[in-house]
Amino acid sequence: MNYLPYFQHYPAALQSQIKTLLEPDKLAAYFKGKYPQGHQLQSTQALYDYCHSYKNKYLKNVPRLHKVSYAKGRDLMTGTLGHHSQTRKQHGGKVKTRYEIALSQQLKYAPEAVLRALVVHELAHFKELDHNKAFYQLCCHMEPEYHQLELDLRLFIVLNKLGVSFYDNSAQPD
Ligand SMILES: [Zn+2]
């Protein structure tokens, strides 16, 4: 499979660098060198606390997050990277808004920086729906390395597709 179209919005010079990485051995070596360990946010509670601390720091006007989860069956490449929702529910006379984030299950076993890119991305959507300039400015405000991390997130998705991700230690005894 040719994964390069997934990187077509990057400048040509960067794309030719990316092209050299899109092989199982090369990509695994890139991740091993840069991110040897996966994150520790295995429980829904730990993930929630992590998201909530970013929200409280940077998006004070957005109400409390109702739910954050790893969602099964979400394909990172064909679908969106993650999912955020604001649903309005009529509750007696009041309209209540529920703020939720669902991340692909594949992010459960990932480097912390890759998870961070997606969390920042989904949180920014609570303020900016589109991928416009203001959206990316907000992402970079929350995470100055956002653009690099989004590239690593995309490379991580390919790492999973190639079946060479090594972050799932759940089967090993401690
Ligand atoms: Zn988005």
Image: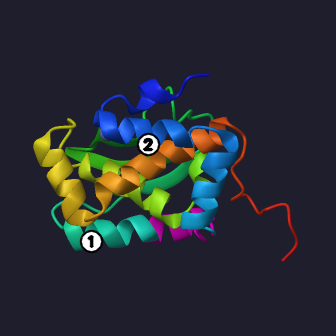
- Residue 9 is one of the magenta-drawn residues: no
- Residue 150 placed where, x, y %? 38, 49
Q: Which residues are magenta?
A: 37-49
Q: Is residue 31 left or right of residue 95?
A: right
Local SS, label 2: helix
Residue 113 in sight: yes
Q: Give me the C-alpha separation between circle 2 and circle 1.
A: 37 Å
Relative to 3, is 89 above or below? below
- Residue 20 placed where, x, y %? 53, 40
Q: Is residue 165 left or right of residue 7?
A: right
Label 2 crowd (10 A; few <14 / some 14-19 / many >=20)? few
The amino acid marked with disc number 2 is Gln
Q: Which residue is mark 2?
A: 17
The amino acid marked with disc number 1 is Asn
Q: Which residue is mark 1?
A: 56
Residue 109 in sight: no
- Coloring applied to the structure: rainbow
74 or 20: nearer the viewer: 20
Q: Is residue 101 left or right of residue 57?
A: right
Direction left: furthest residue: 134
Residue at mark 2: C-beta within 8 A of ligand 1: no
43 or 3: nearer the viewer: 3
Label 1 crowd (10 A; few <14 / some 14-19 / many >=20)? some
Relative to 109, is 25 above or below? above
